[in-house]
Image (cartoon, helix red, strand yellow):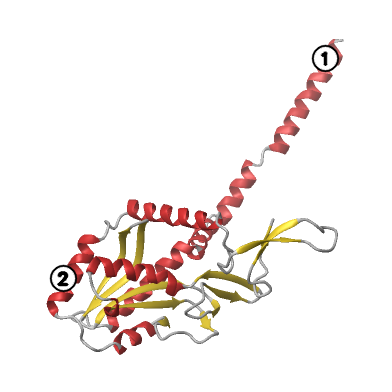
Amino acid sequence: FSTDCVVCTTQDASVRRYTNKKMDFTPILGQVFYSFWYLIPLLLVAAVVKSPWFKGVMGEAIVNISAKYFLNREDYHLIKNVTLPVEDGTTQIDHIIVSRFGIFVIETKNMKGWIFGDAKQKTWTQKIYKHTAKFQNPLHQNYKHVKALETLLELDSSLIHSVIVFVGDSTFKTPMPENVTQAGGYIKFIKSVNQQVLDTRQVADAIERIRSGRKSASFKTSREHVKHVKSIVTEKANSNACPKCGSALILRTVKSGVNTGSQFKGCTKFPACRYTTN
């Protein structure tokens, strides 16, 4: 009996040593981490660079640098990242340039691929190889910014110009209005508007109204604005509008096949738009 116990105890101890030896990956993991630790910051940097936030920051930086070096600061006054209160919340303007030749409201888009659209369409199209995506017509998006600024400054709409700037590796595949530009092309458009419409006093008054009427440029302001935008997106998603083209959805009935008689919602622009939902 005692001999068997000794044998069992010895075997149990051997199994425990084998199991512990087999399951302890700490030295291996430590060696792997030591060998490839430098990849962690590289992966983090890559994630940040590909994020929409970073693309937005880079796009705005390109506009800032272009304005600084190619527009005379005595004639053109750049105001960045302006959040204005409106009836249904807030609206955020990337850049405002105040000058004797008018006020320019700039919306920046950092996108790549082929861009299709015209001034009247609700949505434009981005195509990257076989991938196609819809996005809001930036002219319509900037219209709200222009109207908010028009109300704040109490100026005629003819004195405020909407400007769209695409930065990044994008190509326009349809004719665009002259105020829809790429990279530094917006500088050329601004300089083409060369008739003086505001005097020195009016320029100074516009700058002061923007600075006093804007919400503070802080993390809290940005967070509240993002929350407001998300609520609008959710509201639109719950509406009866097609998320692809903005047209109305109507109830349709399957007339043939295994699903005959079942109903679904389809876009009224069919076959141009083939969006459907249960």
Earlier-in-chain disc, 1 versus 2: 1
Residue at 78 percent of width and 61 percent of height? 254
Q: Amino acid at mark 1?
A: Cys
- Front-most of 22 and 245? 245
Q: In the rendered view, does 259 fall on the left or right side of 141?
A: right
Near mark 2 (Cα within 10 A), the count class, few <14, some 14-19 or many ≥20, is: few
Q: In the rendered view, does 138 fall on the left or right side of 148?
A: right
Near mark 1 (Cα within 10 A), the count class, few <14, some 14-19 or many ≥20, is: few
Pinpoint residue 214: horizontal percent, then vertical percent.
Answer: 26, 60
Quarter of the image for residue 113 reads bottom right
Q: Nearer the viewer, mark 1 or mark 2?
A: 2
Asked if residue 25 is positioned above or below residue 34 in the image, the reply reads: above
Q: In the rendered view, does 262 fall on the left or right side of 163?
A: right
Q: Can see residue 80?
A: no
Q: Secondary structure beneath disc 2? A: helix
Location of mark 1 (residue): 5
Quadrant in which the N terminus is drawn: top right
- Front-most of 186 and 42? 186
Location of mark 2 (residue): 205
Quadrant in which the C terminus is drawn: bottom right
Q: Amino acid at mark 2?
A: Asp
Q: Can see residue 276?
A: yes
Residue at 80 percent of width and 63 percent of height? 255
Count every numbered label the image shows and give the total. 2
Asked if residue 9 is positioned above or below residue 125 in the image, the reply reads: above
Residue situated furthest top in the rendering: 1
